[in-house]
Image (cartoon, rainbow, N blue to C red):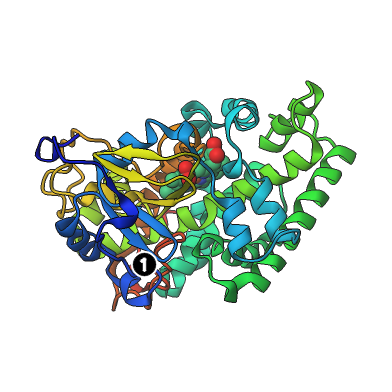
Amino acid sequence: MDAAEEGMPMQQAADLDLPYLTMDEDAFAADPFPHFAAARAQHPWLARWTLGYVVTDYKAMRDLFATEDRMGMLYDNIVEIMDAKGTPWGNFQQRHMLNMSGMPHKRIRDILAPSFTPRQANNHRPLMREVITGLLDEWAPKQSFDFEEFASYFPITVMCRLIGASPDVIPGLRSAMEAIGLSTSMDPRWLPAMQEGVVTMENFVDGLIADRRANPRSGEEPDLLDLLLETQGGGGLSDRELADILIFLFVAGYDTSKNMLTLTMWELLERPEMYRRCAEDHAFARSVVEEAFRIHSTTSSQRVLKEDIVYRDVLLEKDAIVWFPLSVATHDPRYADHFESFDPERQQKNPHIGFGLGAHICLGQYIARAQIHEGLHLIAQRILNPRSSGPQGYRPFPGTWGLRGLPVEFDVAEVPA
Ligand code: HEM
């Protein structure tokens, strides 16, 4: 409890005059952080928006997640709000691991965990370097392009390589990911495209699994798909679970990573010296990526309360939906020193929470970090003096936030023979 609030009588959150955040509006997405600062000035940690409460402060997010067994996952509610029960999109949202809790979730997480360690992510670094080099070979000679579009091919190509999928499928998967990525924006306009996206993904993974079973690879290091198939021998994943996991890995890693790399580039466009140093200094590029995660991190977590929760003398009622916009947490002057400046060398006592908290903390975080780190280091070597007129738009804030289009012009480095 905050000292200033000690001794206050308990209040119902529903009765409080809380700040209202217009998170679903385009103007909000264009510049979200001042809205959160204004909300904190009115109430230190809680706000409201159309679909429930919004926690606006770092410590409150951490404290509430420390009792996460009192919060459930939200995707059943999302499917209900979207009136999509029993549809391909609805079924997928209800089955994937971010909608599981307790033992069923732990079982899946334990099966997957050995393939997502920091060591495994480091083992994938050569593959990540190969992928970004291939993309740069193709895109850099253009001397100008939409950086967001360029960045979108990176995570999807890495994921395809990790599971041995043909590069031919990439354009189709990319369109499907663009649609499914809008799932948590809860905008019914996108539903038909999201349905189509899930069907595309299901057909793709079912075909991939059947093909690998019929044609096992031999004499090669097992890839991620081999490792996940092996768990089936030990009574691990069912076919349905394996298919859902493969789809979810694509979904979870696509627009998060693409948006994050684009936002990192956007920050660096204004900091040419830092950008140049990313090309020369591998360790510095890593620090830049961590600082970009602190400032942006792109995602929100959402939970529904399984019971009443009292926090700092405020009662949040059972069944309330609570949003945790994770990047906002380190934009609070109480929890990040000179929080508004982009400082890769900051000594930050409070870690950022861009990969979430608790039982569902991002499984792919080491892959995501390694991917963006290797990507940035090599991009900065090939794309010189990037210039931009700025973003063309912004992604919806409550989904996976980011820029919608970042045109860049640049000089091209000569590639050594
Ligand atoms: C910039 C990149 C990324 C960011 C910011 C990010 C962020 C997050 C966050 C915040 C969560 C927790 C959501 C919640 O608790 O509601 C999460 C979960 C998850 N992420 Fe990521 N992610 C990223 C990249 C990736 C990648 C590349 C993969 C896979 C290769 C991945 C796989 C997952 C999975 C499987 C979960 C669910 C874990 C569970 O339910 O136990 N993520 N991610």
Asked if residue 409 lies left or right of residue 129, the reply is left
The one nearer the camera, 406 or 338, is 338
- Closer to us: 407 or 202: 202
Q: Mark 1 belongs to which amino acid?
A: Met
Q: Residue at x 37, y 64 (%)?
A: 49
Question: Height in image: 62 above or below 196?
Answer: above
Question: For the point 34% across and 41% down, which residue is it?
Answer: 353
Where, by quadrant of the figure, is residue 194 drawn? bottom right
Where does label 1 land, which residue? 23
Q: Residues within 10 Å of mark 1 (few under 14, many from 20)?
A: many
Quadrant (top left, top right, bottom left, bottom right) of the N terminus = top left
Q: Secondary structure at mark 1?
A: loop
- Give how far across and how far down residue 170 sits, in percent: 66, 61
Q: Does residue 11 lie above or below 181 as drawn?
A: above
Which residue reaches farthest top? 234
Question: Residue 295: where, in percent of width, then height?
Answer: 27, 52
